[in-house]
Image (cartoon, rainbow, N blue to C red):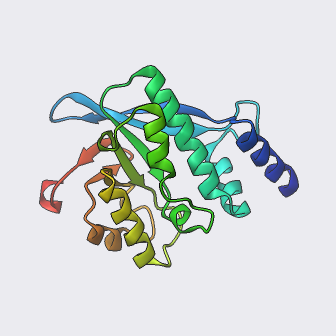
């Protein structure tokens, strides 16, 4: 598939709301219960952008990552609300999307209001796919989310570029993908 075809496929997916959300349970082993669900997004099954790796790579390349992430959050919030899932909703957010010029503060809060989900039920889960150049701007954005009532978590701690610097932002939770569990508190508790 050529770059032009990939960009066209991305535009079509975004224009037609062609994303599909799946939910992976987040389990507390100590409490032996489901704490909530991580929203995972996929492109249409018949598309070369079905895979999230391909989908997000094309959006990143096109400078449309923020737009794609908002579309993913819309799909996730709608489906989470329709299924009336209990517990927290974990939404993946790449720090670089928060720093894009196209990022519109307040869109996530508006989506939650539209679907009747309180911010206290949502965990903004930071993914680390690329280096963070403007750490202060990122820190301001995270404080903005926290001030609106969201919890903040790190996804795949240590797999990215800036894990140690992100710890200074007072992360609420850390999740390690291979084990799908939440670790809270200090390193000694992990």
For the point 67% across and 38% down, the residue is 43
Which quadrant of the structure image shows residue 102? bottom right
Left or right, 177 with reference to 74: left
| Residue found 68% across the figure and 55% down from its top | 59
What's the residue at 62%, 57% (across, down)? Answer: 65
Q: Nearer the viewer, residue 151 or 113?
A: 113
164, above or below 126, in the image: below
Residue 140 figure quarter: bottom left
Residue 100: give x, y in percent of width and height.
59, 67
Q: Nearer the viewer, residue 86 or 28?
A: 86
Q: Position of residue 133 (x, y in %)?
A: 50, 78
* Total count of labels: 0
Q: Position of residue 86 (x, y in %)?
A: 32, 26
Given residues 112 and 174, the one toward you in this image is 112
Determine the residue located farthest toward the top in the rendered image: 83
Residue 80, percent from left and from top = 45, 29
Left or right: 39, with 55 as reference point: left
- In the displayed structure, 72 sits above or below 172; it is above
103 to the left or right of 61: left
Seen from the viewer's position, the closer of residues 157 and 95 is: 95
36 shown above or below 162: above
Name the side, left or right, on which 73 lies relative to 122: right
Residue in the image at 57% along x and 50% along y: 69
Give the position of the C terminus as an image quadrant: bottom left
């Amino acid at each position: 598939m050529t770059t032009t075809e990939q960009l066209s496929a991305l535009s079509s997916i975004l224009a037609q709301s062609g994303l599909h959300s799946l939910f992976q349970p987040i389990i507390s082993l100590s409490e032996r219960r489901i704490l909530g669900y991580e929203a995972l997004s996929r492109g249409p099954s018949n598309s070369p952008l079905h895979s999230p790796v391909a989908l997000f790579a094309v959006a990143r390349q096109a400078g449309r990552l923020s737009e794609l992430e908002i579309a993913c959050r819309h799909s996730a919030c709608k489906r989470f609300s329709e299924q009336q899932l209990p517990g927290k909703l974990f939404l993946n957010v790449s720090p670089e999307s928060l720093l894009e010029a196209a990022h519109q503060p307040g869109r996530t809060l508006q989506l939650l209001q539209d679907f009747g989900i309180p911010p206290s039920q949502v965990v903004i889960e930071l993914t680390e796919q690329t280096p963070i150049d403007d750490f202060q701007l990122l820190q301001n954005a995270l404080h903005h989310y926290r001030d609106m009532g969201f919890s903040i978590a790190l996804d795949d701690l240590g797999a990215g570029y800036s894990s140690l610097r992100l710890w200074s932002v007072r992360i609420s939770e850390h999740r390690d993908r291979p084990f799908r569990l939440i670790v809270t508190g200090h390193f000694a508790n992990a």
